[in-house]
Image (cartoon, grey):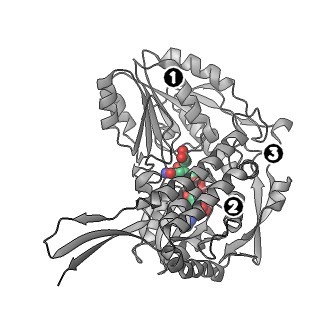
Amino acid sequence: MTESINNVHKDLFINGEWINTADYKDLINPATGKVIAKIAQADETQVEDAIQAAYDAFQPWKSLELKDRTQYLHNIADLLEEHADRLAEIMTIEQGKSIKESKLEVIAGAESFRWNAEEARRLYGETIPAPNDHKYEIAYEPVGVVGAITPWNFPSGMITRKIAPALAAGNTVVLKPSSDTPLSALAIFELFEQAELPKGVANIVMGSSKEIGEAMTSSKLVKKITFTGSTPIGKALYAQSADTLKKMSLELGGHAPFIINADADIDAAVEGLMAAKFRNNGQVCIAPNRIFVHKSIKDNVLKQLTEKVEALKVGNGLNEDTNVGPLIREDAIDKIKKQIINATDKGATLVTGGHRLTGDEYDNGFFFQPTILDNVNRTMDIFYEETFGPVIPIITFDTLEEVIEMANDSEFGLASYAYAKDSKTIQTIATSLEYGMVGINEVAISNPETPFGGVKHSGFGRENSHLGIKEYVTAKFINTKFL
Ligand SMILES: NC(=O)c1ccc[n+]([C@@H]2O[C@H](COP(=O)([O-])OP(=O)(O)OC[C@H]3O[C@@H](n4cnc5c(N)ncnc54)[C@H](O)[C@@H]3O)[C@@H](O)[C@H]2O)c1
Ligand SMILES: O=CCCC(=O)O
């Protein structure tokens, strides 16, 4: 295996020290199916140690001069940029996405650190009109120890967008990264160590998800849980946190509608769809999963789309010419195959793709053909279930009213997209879609400056933007009477 994987730490990082464990678990490269590393698995005491270390570090970290605290974040941003190539290689090997995408993700993480370092200096309190002998103030204070749990699809980005605002606002953190992609997280923690972040401010534990989740949610010392992952696990953590009444942010599943109206710029719509759908091989919570095309333009859209989908190069993400890497695990392939079989059994047409890719070129990796399904309807599982893979289901519509009703027919409410020109149509779509984010003639909806998050079973809370950092503070009201 490459030097980058051999050299990255595989142990826990607690109170500024690398800590080994009694148990180590195999980590697989999804592009080859081979074991690439053995990862430390924390026991119960080690998880408690990490929480205690974060608790002990909280008061000194919170009390630092703001310019000193935020300087650490700027230094981390510099280090992320400096080490972006190495971090990108580690990410591609453990997760599969193309090396270009991995690098963009690391750089976006550096941006998160910079943005939040700047925004922390603008966490202004407020003064409220009061009687002359009183002062009413609101002060924003850090919540304390934050438990962060992250998924595998953005092994670096989901961590940086949580840890940067948490630390910037004066909190300390215990992170549990995904068991499928711990190396990217560990490589980031090496940079925290290099930046000489004070001991205990950021800690990382790997191990049994259930046990670590329970330790975090039941702990009286942990004041907030920030979770990104699937809806069922998010709901379980929400229930588990009831007893200790934690502040929570839940960034959960999505099943984005993508509407192409009769008056849309078809070239732009197809280009946007390709970019958003095949980013990370469709394993993105904001990936378009239900493509609603006006019936008058369906043939034209399908022709353009099929040409582009068939031209995609599937392969190991380390190869510079790869557009689409492997899926994360064997069971991800099973899920997609099941959705495709269910849809075709019920009348969908397989336009292209639909099969696993095997053979020497694909090693023992989890590769799947980019796929288009036509004539999809509401009787099929793919209409309602999150897809998380390279499948484009086409559903046709007649009227605006009909497509809005179908687009909203989902338990999820994260991202949505629409391509149209008429301003009244655009306004109707933007205001009627029951989603946390709406991209109109645009698929780039995730930036440090703009709020990211969902409604319905996609969770609550916002990441990025001035709203993101507010998830890591409490508003204290101070009423002073002058005697
Ligand atoms: N809304 C968003 O911003 C966003 C972003 C990325 C991914 N996602 C969602 O994440 C999902 C894919 O990621 P995944 O497969 O890693 O999700 P997942 O829910 O299986 O796992 C997410 C994290 O939770 C941990 N976990 C699993 N069981 C747990 C338990 N019982 N207690 C505590 N932690 C537990 C996992 O180890 C991982 O670290 C998709 O549903 C996707 O839509 C959402
Ligand atoms: O799956 C999560 C989406 C990440 C992003 O686009 O910022």
Name the mark on residue 182.
2
Judge depth for marks 1 and 3 and give the one in front: 1
State the residue position of label 3. 364
Considering only order in the chain, which callout, 3 or 1, is on the residue closer to the N terminus? 1
- Percent x, y for residue 439? 43, 35
Q: Are marks 1 and 3 in contact (CB under 8 Å)?
A: no
Name the mark on residue 268.
1
Mark 1 is surrounded, within 10 Å at the Cα level, by few (under 14), some (14 to 19) or many (20 or more) other residues, namely few
Q: The residue under label 2 is which amino acid type?
A: Pro
Mark 2 is surrounded, within 10 Å at the Cα level, by few (under 14), some (14 to 19) or many (20 or more) other residues, namely many
168 or 344, which is in the foreground? 168
Name the mark on residue 454.
none
User: What is the secondary structure assignment of the residue under circle 3?
Assistant: loop
Considering only order in the chain, which callout, 3 or 2, is on the residue closer to the N terminus? 2
Q: The residue under label 3 is which amino acid type?
A: Asn
Q: Residue at x 51, y 74 (%)?
A: 64
